[in-house]
């Protein structure tokens, strides 16, 4: 079919379904979507809780556990030992297929009765307060990733160690407050850097060492605010810079933010890509509107957030998408193929409308299954029976569609309705990337979790903390520190926090002052440094000899347009309202590489 403009069944805005999109939908046997890409993304995000944790008891053994499911969740919640044991069988919760009843309603009743594992935390050691973390050791409040060691207060860390307060880190060591950085050592307060060491306050730098406050450098050493120094000069200058003082550190942050705006940046972070639109993408081809594809081999992906690792023919997916093929409308799916409209599917094949299934194949509308095949609503069927029933179910979903409390209709081909999520809006990553106030969320008929008043009694307030780490006594680990925000923010502020002994040791080792914000507020401040998951069509801001705002003077002749304005157009995650100078790839390369 030719491209077609449609009106979103949720927000009412127009969106485009392109000819290639129709080809993909036809290949996997689903109808074209009725919601726009952004609304579809938010709807999927509502089924992923990463950072909201609760204390409760295992509903099997009674052991105290930490869980991502709050006390209102209807299904039993098991500790890892109980959930993975052979003491129970998800088939025991199976429901007979009844074509007089709505299929999605029947599935909701099923998954709300089948036990869920309290967290996604596998093969970890001494990692009690983590979620979606694998094969890690001695981590605390780390959410997402694998093979981390001695990492604190971070999100999506892979192969990283002895670090704290990271957002999207790959192969980092002794690092702090870095956002989307890779393969670096003793790098702090930096964004989108790779291969850097012994440096602070870098943006878009690669293979640099002993640098401070620099932007867009390649293979440089001993630079301060992009000015080169000899080794001796650099060391003398750095002796005057003391990041162990909170007051001085705040001044360095402010100066670096202002300095950063004086340089052009590439319209998108695309590395070794071919025919790709999006941001923060490595080693991919033929991908559109994709974000955070941070490992190689992605091919023919569209509307994907946080994927990669050999994912092929994937549309509308968030988180995971590792070693996968032919996925559509999925959340947290690993090492699987032909998975549609499902959540938390690992090592499976041919799965539809299912939740939390492992090593299964040919299942439709199932929950909590392991090592099963040819199941519908957790009932076992023969291969012949299954293949006969699935087309009938799809037809039944069209003839008796689910209708949510807003009157929106869900036929076969739609992801789960938001109201079926086990989480409230502000418990999920939807609140992080598409934040809403409580009133706005409730006006859109989303569930909302009131976390209740924090009854912490601070023993010390941020203004009374020692300015310098050298003046902090060991007894600080016994204090309750008030968060500077005091809950007057939308960051799920805990209002107070404590500093652990290992954390204090890290600050002293790295010469860093004590934080003034709780871990949640610090996470949201890092999150604010990244661009939104949206693309705007824009034109290069190179205006011949200078940038359009005249803040930057070009250092090279741009042969593609000379002294005239560059006319190159692109899709970028930098909104036209932003202050940054955004160049096309050709103009950027003339200035940076």
Image (spheres, grey):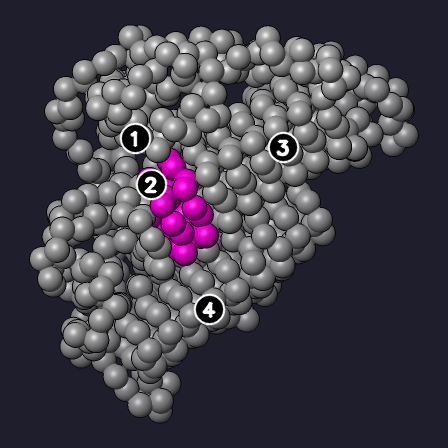
The CA span between labels 2 and 4 is 29 Å
Q: Position of residue 58 (x, y in %)?
A: 14, 57
**Is residue 139 on the magenta stretch?**
yes
Residue pictured at 35% horizontal, 55% vertical: 124
Dot 3 or dot 4, earlier in sequence: 3
The CA span between labels 1 and 2 is 10 Å
Vertically, is 531 above or below 371?
A: above
The CA span between labels 1 and 4 is 40 Å
Name the residue beneath numbered marker 3: 197
Left or right of 533? Residue 267 is: right
Name the residue beneath numbered marker 1: 500
Dot 1 or dot 4, earlier in sequence: 4
- The C terminus appears in which quarter of the rendering? top right
Residue pictured at 18% horizontal, 18% vertical: 458
Q: Secondary structure at mark 2?
A: strand
Name the residue beneath numbered marker 4: 336
Dot 2 or dot 4, earlier in sequence: 2
Q: Is residue 112 visible?
A: no
Dot 1 or dot 2, earlier in sequence: 2
Q: Tell me where the magenta segment starts and ends, as one range.
A: 131-153
Q: Nearer the viewer, residue 127 or 43?
A: 127
Name the residue beneath numbered marker 2: 140
Q: Secondary structure at mark 1?
A: loop
Q: Say if mark 1 contacts mark 4, CB within 8 Å.
A: no
Vertically, is 115 above or below 92?
A: above
């Amino acid at each position: 079919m030719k491209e077609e403009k449609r009106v979103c069944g949720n927000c009412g805005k127009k969106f485009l379904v392109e000819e290639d999109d129709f080809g993909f939908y036809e290949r996997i046997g689903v109808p074209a979507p009725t919601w726009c890409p952004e609304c579809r993304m938010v709807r999927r995000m509502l089924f992923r809780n990463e950072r909201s944790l609760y204390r409760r008891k295992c509903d099997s053994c009674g052991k105290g556990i930490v869980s991502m499911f709050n006390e209102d969740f209807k299904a039993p919640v098991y500790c890892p030992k109980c959930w993975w044991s052979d003491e129970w069988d998800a088939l025991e919760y199976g429901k007979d297929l009844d074509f007089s009843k709505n299929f999605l309603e029947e599935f909701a009743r099923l998954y709300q009765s089948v036990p869920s594992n309290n967290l996604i935390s596998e093969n970890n050691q001494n990692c009690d307060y983590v979620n979606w973390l694998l094969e890690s050791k001695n981590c605390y409040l780390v959410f997402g990733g694998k093979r981390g060691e001695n990492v604190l207060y971070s999100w999506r860390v892979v192969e990283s160690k002895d670090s704290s307060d990271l957002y999207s880190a790959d192969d980092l060591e002794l690092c702090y407050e870095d956002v989307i950085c890779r393969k670096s050592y003793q790098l702090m307060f930096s964004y989108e850097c790779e291969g850097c060491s012994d440096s602070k306050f870098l943006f878009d730098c690669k293979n640099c060492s002993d640098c401070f406050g620099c932007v867009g450098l390649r293979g440089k050493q001993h630079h301060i605010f992009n000015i080169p120094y000899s080794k001796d000069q650099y060391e003398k200058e750095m002796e005057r810079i003391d990041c162990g003082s909170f007051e001085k550190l705040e001044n360095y942050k402010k100066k670096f933010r202002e300095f950063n705006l004086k340089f052009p940046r590439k319209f998108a972070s695309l590395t070794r890509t071919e025919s790709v639109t999006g941001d923060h993408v490595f080693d991919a081809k033929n991908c559109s509107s994709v974000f955070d594809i941070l490992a190689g081999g992605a091919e023919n992906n569209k509307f994907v957030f946080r994927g990669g690792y050999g994912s092929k023919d994937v549309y509308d997916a968030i988180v995971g998408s590792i070693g996968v093929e032919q996925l559509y409308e999925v959340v947290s799916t690993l090492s699987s193929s032909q998975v549609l409209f499902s959540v938390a599917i690992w090592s499976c094949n041919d799965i539809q409308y299912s939740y939390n299934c492992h090593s299964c194949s040919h299942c439709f509308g199932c929950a909590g299954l392991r090592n099963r095949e040819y199941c519908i609503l957790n009932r076992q069927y023969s291969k012949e029976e299954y293949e006969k029933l699935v087309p009938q179910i799809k037809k039944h979903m069209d003839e008796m569609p689910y209708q949510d409390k807003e009157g929106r209709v869900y036929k076969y081909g739609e992801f789960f309705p938001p109201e079926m999520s086990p989480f409230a809006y502000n418990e999920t990553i939807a609140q992080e990337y598409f934040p809403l106030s409580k009133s706005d969320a409730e006006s859109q008929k989303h569930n909302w979790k009131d976390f209740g008043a924090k009854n912490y009694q601070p023993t010390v307030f941020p203004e009374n903390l020692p300015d310098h780490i050298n003046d902090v006594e060991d007894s600080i680990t016994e204090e309750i520190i008030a968060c500077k925000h005091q809950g007057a923010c939308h960051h799920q502020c805990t209002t107070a926090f404590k500093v652990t002994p290992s954390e204090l040791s890290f600050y002293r080792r790295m010469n860093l002052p004590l934080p003034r914000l709780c871990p949640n507020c610090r996470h949201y401040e890092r999150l604010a440094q990244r661009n939104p998951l949206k693309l705007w069509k824009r034109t290069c801001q190179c205006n011949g000899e200078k940038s359009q705002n005249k803040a930057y003077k070009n250092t090279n002749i741009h042969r593609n347009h000379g002294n005239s304005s560059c006319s190159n157009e692109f899709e970028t995650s930098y909104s036209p309202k932003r202050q940054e100078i955004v160049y096309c790839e050709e103009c950027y390369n003339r200035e940076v590489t």
